[in-house]
Amino acid sequence: MSELFRAIQENDLPAFERTLRDQPELRDARDERGNSALLISIYYGRTQIAARLVQLGVKPSFFEACA
């Protein structure tokens, strides 16, 4: 599992911010099942992380918007 998804699952906002600062392209990353970082953050109830992804320009898909 990537450092980004680990930070989301563990609700580690500093690690999440650090990872995206070092690798900004990861904001659009998908896990091994094809789930986006935004969807995973919503699924785990990480509202601060989800909001930060949207602030960074991630456009929610229809399914992510419904979640």
Image: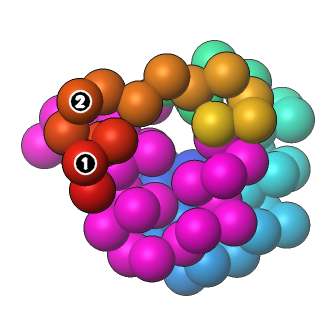
Figure quadrant of the N terminus:
bottom left
Q: Residue at x 19, y 39 (%)?
A: 63
- Residues drawn in magenta: 29-53
For disc 2, the neighbor class at 10 Å (few under 14, some 14 to 19, many from 20) is few
Q: Position of residue 4 (x, y in %)?
A: 57, 51
Check disc 1 and report the residue beneath it: 66
Front one among 64 and 41: 64
Front one among 50 and 29: 50
Amino acid type of disc 2? Answer: Phe
Rendered position, 9 above or below 54: below
Give the farthest residue toward the left.
Answer: 33
Q: Residue at x 57, y 54 (%)?
A: 50
Q: In the drawing, does residue 28 fall left or right of residue 49?
A: left
Regarding residue 3, the answer to whether it shows in the image is no
Amino acid type of disc 1? Answer: Cys
Rendered position, 16 above or below 10: above
Front one among 62 and 35: 62
